[in-house]
Image (cartoon, rainbow, N blue to C red):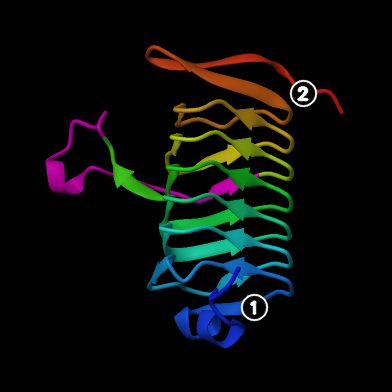
């Protein structure tokens, strides 16, 4: 990528480790990165916004227009995982099911996206979720519970449905 961020610039944003052979668009915005890690071969495309604690393994791909908010816990994407365009990942969110007053209704927790996972365009991943290794999430799903390894998940109506498992 012509004009991508240099290693020292990424370190200045708050990354403590930046791997080799990375491509990070200058149109990506970083806010308050805390102890972030970028592994080898990572690619982050245009117009994504990253904030808080974020750890990328090797060969992770972030498509354009993604929002990753690690302000309530760490977002960890393991090796060879990727997310499609317009995906949002939250480690802090309002708790819409709570009976508490509005200001007191928060859910926080880490998000882990396992090895070789693919998350389709438009998905929303909510706090305190682990997506197992080799899982595949269909476009526009809202993930609020853990996803089993090798699961194939799609969104239908008010919930998610596991429609199968990926073969090894």
- Does residue 57 lie above or below 7 as drawn? above
Q: CA distance from mark 2 to mark 1?
A: 32 Å
Give the x, y percent position of residue 75. Answer: 53, 55
Give the x, y percent position of residue 142. Answer: 43, 29
Q: Residue furthest right?
A: 168
Residue on which the image places disc 2: 166
Residue at the spot 65% in from the left edge and 76% down from the top edge? 18
Q: Compare marks 2 and 1 and give the one earlier in the sequence.
A: 1
Q: Are marks 2 and 1 in contact (CB under 8 Å)?
A: no
Residue on which the image places disc 1: 17
Q: Which mark is residue 34?
A: none
Q: Quick one: SS at disc 1?
A: strand
17 lies left or right of 64: right
Q: Residue furthest front?
A: 2
Q: Residues within 10 Å of mark 1 (few under 14, many from 20)?
A: some
Magenta segment: 96-113
Q: Is residue 111 magenta?
A: yes
Where is residue 99, by image quadrant?
top left
Give the x, y percent position of residue 21. Answer: 73, 71
């Amino acid at each position: 990528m012509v004009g991508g961020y240099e290693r020292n610039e990424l370190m200045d944003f708050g990354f403590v480790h930046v791997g080799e052979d990375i491509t990070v668009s200058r149109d990506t915005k970083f806010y308050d990165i805390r102890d972030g890690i970028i592994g080898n071969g990572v690619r982050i495309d245009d117009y994504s916004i990253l904030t808080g604690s974020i750890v990328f393994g090797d060969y992770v791909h972030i498509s354009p227009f993604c929002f990753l908010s690690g302000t309530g816990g760490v977002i960890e994407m393991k090796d060879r995982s990727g997310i499609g365009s317009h995906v949002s990942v939250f480690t802090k969110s309002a708790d819409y099911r709570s009976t508490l007053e509005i200001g007191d209704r928060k859910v926080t927790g880490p998000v882990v996206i396992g090895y070789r996972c693919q998350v389709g365009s438009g998905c929303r991943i909510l706090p305190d979720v682990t997506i197992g290794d080799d899982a595949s999430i269909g476009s526009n799903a809202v993930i609020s519970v853990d996803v089993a390894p090798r699961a194939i998940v799609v969104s239908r109506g008010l919930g998610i449905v596991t429609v199968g498992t990926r073969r090894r």
